[in-house]
Amino acid sequence: MITDRLIDGIIAMQNPTCVGLDTLFDYLPDEMKAGAKTFDDVCERVFEFNKKLIDTLRDIVPSVKVQIAYYEMYGVPGMKAYEETLKYASEKDLVVIADAKRNDIGSTAACYAKTFLGETTVNDRAYKAFPADYVTVNGYLGTDGIAPFVEECAKNDKGIFALVKTSNPSSGELQNLLLQNGQTVYEYMGAMVEKWGETTIGKYGYSAVGAVVGATHPTEAARLRQVLPHTFYLIPGYGAQGGNAEMLKSCFKADGLGGVVNNSRGILCAYKKNGGTYYEAARAAAIAMQRDLSSVIGKMGR
């Protein structure tokens, strides 16, 4: 089961880090940007940048998250670079999260689910469009929008991460509102996520239906951890958004498991702060993050 595979990697590396390949052209070193004139030029270099990072980090981090918006902005060449990045990371045995936050219902949701988790058939031959191990989804349309994704998860051993308590400062405008039953909106959504995943629980006790829970809201994360025993977290907000290891400790259980922590700019752009090549600086930043998280979480899988 995919969440078991992700946890296996976290335990083996003692590292619950997910590297966010939110790769803007502006993040590239000047020598890689020089002479680029078209979207094709940009995307060739973005993919080259990503490949080197994947090669440099694959032995110390278990997963990557590829945010689709950073590629869509470069049009069709950007989507090609997105596809190539997903495939290359998968070939290097990383758990790959397509960060696309899909949100729709019925047949349209089914199309999105096939895009990232399943296959599309053309004259009896099946093709994978943007293959990933997980895709992020927005569950605020309710079960109609999630059921097609859960179906593809069960069929293809894939997973999803549904938005529950996001890391942005204004998330509380909606997610912290109280319902008539006394729950907050995010708690109710968390309970729905737990139920959506109840048929896909693996050997570690977590399902293929995970939750996005931000590191920047530790009190809310702690409340969710108590009532979502089978829900694995994708945890954004560490680093550039203000989250730190101590803040996200509440996302994890006593055995050091429970989530994977994303860091994008702090790793991609580490060379701008610390010098050296971009890939050596990225590796050093990933190692520093692993040590920081381990100092708070402790041994994972204990």
Image (cartoon, rainbow, N blue to C red):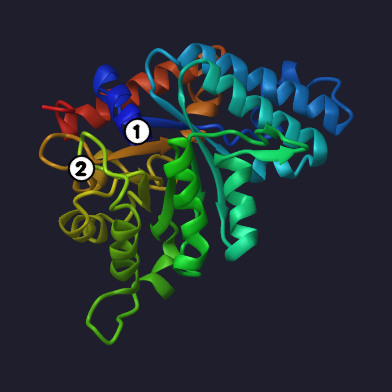
Q: Earlier in the sequence, mark 2 or mark 1?
A: 1
- What is the three-letter code of the residue carrying label 1? Met
Q: Which mark is residue 1?
A: 1
- What is the three-letter code of the residue carrying label 2? Phe
- Camera-nearest residue between 126 and 225: 126
Foreground label between 2 and 1: 1
Name the element at disc 1: loop
- Give the residue number, with chain letter if any, for mark 2: 252
- In the picture as drawn, the residue positioned furthest to the front comes out as 124
State whether residue 179 is above or below residue 33.
Answer: below
Q: Quadrant of the N terminus?
A: top left
The image quadrant that residue 298 belongs to is top left
Residue ID at (19%, 55%): 222
Give how far across and how far down residue 244 sits, in percent: 30, 42
Q: Which mark is residue 121?
A: none
Name the element at disc 2: loop
Judge the density around disc 1: few (<14), some (14-19), many (≥20) Cα neighbours within 10 Å: some
Q: Quadrant of the C terminus?
A: top left
